[in-house]
Image (cartoon, grey):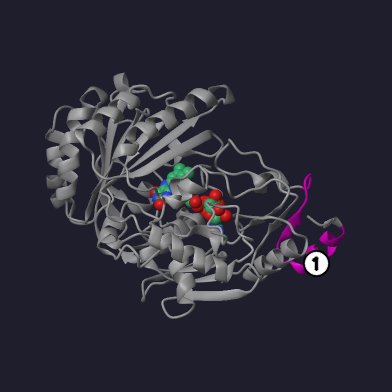
Amino acid sequence: MKNFTESVPGFRKLVAGSVLLPGDPGYDESRAIWNGMFDKKPALIARCTSTEDVSKAVIFAREHQLPIAVKGGGHNSAGNAVCDDGMMIDLSLMQGVEVDADRQRAKVEGGCLLGAVDEATQEHGLAVSAGIVSHTGVGGLTLGGGFGWISRKYGLTIDNLLSVELVTAKGKVVFASATENKDLFWAVRGGGGNFGIATTFEFQAAAIGTELYTGPVVKRFEDTADYIRFHREYVRKMPDEMTIWMVVRHAPPLPFIPEEYHGKLVVLIPFVWLGDPEEGEKLIQPIRDFGETVGDGSGVKPWKDWQSAFDGLVSHGARNYWKSHHLKDLSDECIEVITTYAAKMPHEECEVFIPHMEGAPSRIDPVSTAFPHRNTPFLLNLHTRWQDASDDDRCIRWAREFHDATRPFSQGVYVNFLSEEGDARVREAYTEEVWKRLVKIKQRWDPENTFRMNQNISPTP
Ligand SMILES: Cc1cc2nc3c(=O)[nH]c(=O)nc-3n(C[C@H](O)[C@H](O)[C@H](O)COP(=O)(O)OP(=O)(O)OC[C@H]3O[C@@H](n4cnc5c(N)ncnc54)[C@H](O)[C@@H]3O)c2cc1C
């Protein structure tokens, strides 16, 4: 790293946003990320307000040999959005969303959060297929793949990406789409932030309306194994319009859950139905009728409310350690492991999260984007979450042991759910063919690995 402090006043004049050094007002707020496990201190922060700012920041960092970390929404559990000593390029002031209602398209700036996209698109009854927590960043989510409540019907977030504006490792502004810089467009759809800093995304939106039939049905934890045996068959028979997931966790004190269950382990079965509520209700009835239902929060709800319904359970600042993989199936052996470890959940904020993934994404050629694991029916994500550093060891150990025990039932991992797990694990997010192609594209667009504070695809095989 070259001494850069003398150049900071000049850099400040160059950018429209702000340049923050340790101790400056706003420095600590800017470097804070969702996962409270990380307390990294960049040597300087460029809070960019435009693509030009981002380009100037990349050039400055390169000239002074500063490693670059890029903060989109700062939500990734691996904590890559921030670095020690280098430059953090903070995109969080780049929050613009423009909706073209006639063409059902949304242009979204690289630092936007999902809530802002829902806010703008819902004005027109539209939605972009993306994640389920409104304070997640569009940037990281999209570049890694992106899935949520409507992706079984409309595809992953990357399947709805029409074009992207990027600042390259040389600080150049380029566009990528199906017709321009096609290799780059392929790579950014699953390859993460390895190829450039995305300053604007253009998405296809879907006309879903503003109210949908949604809800969790709640089951007793004692019936988990029986319920999963039913669930694994039933949800796979559903039309793409119906998405039914499963979460084992301690019951939050919600009005539709009887008080005696509050704070106890339960199975939540949240769902979203894209269609006539009466038809959806008929499809959910067998779930209610299976065994005992202890709570039912289903009903027609505004989409924006539903999209932020889980925000409070995963608020900023807690300590988090995620372990995940795609599941080939939910075999009896796998269910046995899930129920055994779920019963030993180390903290009441932890969750065993099992979304059903099949649908439109699995009908897309697995090598047409850099997101190849499209054919696994389920995903297992261990949301290990707690508050006190003294609980680190036992919480992390639970996640690791649980994860290892389910490994025989897994195939690959979703890159956005990786913790800091090493190079070999990053490769498991891709197939061999996809990995080789990613490395070639990295060699072309970022041969010096300028963008390496991420789930890294190194240009040097
Ligand atoms: C509570 C919670 C809920 C989640 N729910 C979902 C979900 O429903 N569906 C889903 O698919 N995923 C979900 N995720 C995972 C999510 O997709 C990732 O955490 C994602 O990386 C978040 O993006 P971000 O911009 O907020 O992350 P950041 O931490 O800011 O960045 C993550 C990585 O992406 C890079 N990056 C971010 N923005 C850009 C950009 N504009 N250009 C270049 N590189 C960039 C960063 O450098 C970093 O390496 C969830 C995560 C959490 C913590």
**Ligand 1 within 8 Å, label 1 CB:** no
Of 230 and 105, the residue lying toward us = 230
Q: Image height check: is 320 above or below 107? A: above
- For label 1, the crowd category at 10 Å Cα-Cα, with few meaning under 14, some 14 to 19 and many 20 or more, is few
Q: Residue at 75% across / 59% down in the picture? A: 65
Q: Which quadrant of the view contains residue 351?
A: top left
Q: How many marks?
A: 1
Percent position of residue 219, x then y: 23, 29
Q: Residue at 45% across / 76% down in the picture? A: 182
Query: Is residue 349 something one can see in this rendering?
Result: no
Find the magenta span and give its range.
Answer: 6-24
Find the residue positioned furthest to the bottom: 179
Q: Amino acid at mark 1?
A: Lys
Q: Which quadrant of the view contains residue 142?
A: bottom left
Query: Is residue 29 something one can see in this rendering?
Result: yes
Find the residue positioned furthest to the top: 260
Q: Quadrant of the N terminus?
A: bottom right
Percent position of residue 175, x then y: 52, 75
Percent position of residue 409, x then y: 29, 39
Provide the secondary structure element on which disc 1 rests. helix
Residue 225 horizontal side relative to residue 394, left or right: left
Residue 14 horizontal side relative to residue 268, left or right: right
Q: Image height check: is 430 above or below 60? A: above
Q: Per the image, is 243 magenta?
A: no
Percent position of residue 435, x then y: 44, 60
Find the residue positioned furthest to the front: 461
Q: Per the image, is 20 magenta?
A: yes
Write down the residue under mark 1.
13
Of 376 and 355, the residue lying toward us = 376
Q: Residue at 65% across / 39% down in the picture? A: 39
Of 316 and 198, the residue lying toward us = 198
Residue 181 horizontal side relative to residue 289, left or right: right
